[in-house]
Amino acid sequence: MPQDGFAPAIITESEPETGARAQADRAPAQSEVDGQVRPHWCNATSTLIDDIHRLGGYSVMRADIGEGRTLERYWNASEEVIIEHGGDGTSCLVDLRPR
């Protein structure tokens, strides 16, 4: 834990992306106008949520974005995390930033 007493909201390790997914992640970012979300990495929803809760995170917003996908925003004392939940039991880290 850092000396300021706050730990990062997400500490889960995941396997590196390979193949087509890795190539898509290296592609230029799409404009926000088209509504596409490019995740940083993905893991089992239960693992991500357990880590967020363990580090003091809580949900502050949840929005259905269609096709079985949901965006959820979490806060802890120092960070904001945005997760995209898929219908397959996997969630992806979309954004992580200081609050």
Image: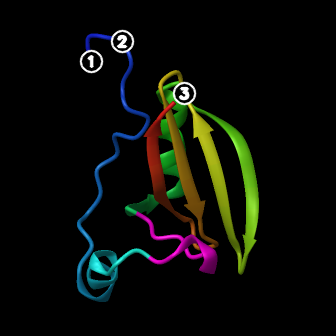
Marking on residue 76: 3
Residue 38: image x %, image y %?
46, 70
Of callouts 1 and 3, the N-terminal one:
1
Q: Which residue is mark 2?
A: 5
Residue 69: image x %, image y %?
67, 71
- Cα separation between marks 1 and 2: 6 Å
Could you tell me the amino acid type at mark 2? Gly
What are the residue bounds of the magenta stretch?
30-39
Quadrant placement of the N terminus: top left
Q: Which residue is mark 1?
A: 2
Marking on residue 49: none
Do the residues under discs 1 and 2 have CB atoms within 8 angstroms?
yes
**Label 3: how many Cα within 10 Å (few below 14, some 14–19, many 20+):** many
* 64 sits to left or right of 10: right
**Label 2: how many Cα within 10 Å (few below 14, some 14–19, many 20+):** few
**Label 1: how many Cα within 10 Å (few below 14, some 14–19, many 20+):** few
Does residue 83 belong to the magenta stretch?
no
| Residue occupying image coordinates x 26% and y 11% | 3
State whether residue 43 is above or below residue 31: above
In terms of depth relative to the viewer, which is nearer, 9 or 51?
Answer: 9
Residue 81: image x %, image y %?
52, 44
State whether residue 81 is above or below residue 22: above
Does residue 35 belong to the magenta stretch?
yes
| Residue occupying image coordinates x 34% and y 45% | 12
Residue 9: image x %, image y %?
44, 35
Could you tell me the amino acid type at mark 3? Asn
Residue 33 sits in which quadrant?
Answer: bottom right
State whether residue 19 is above or below residue 36: below
- Cα separation between marks 3 and 2: 12 Å
Helix, strand or loop under label 3: loop
Helix, strand or loop under label 1: loop
Could you tell me the amino acid type at mark 1? Pro
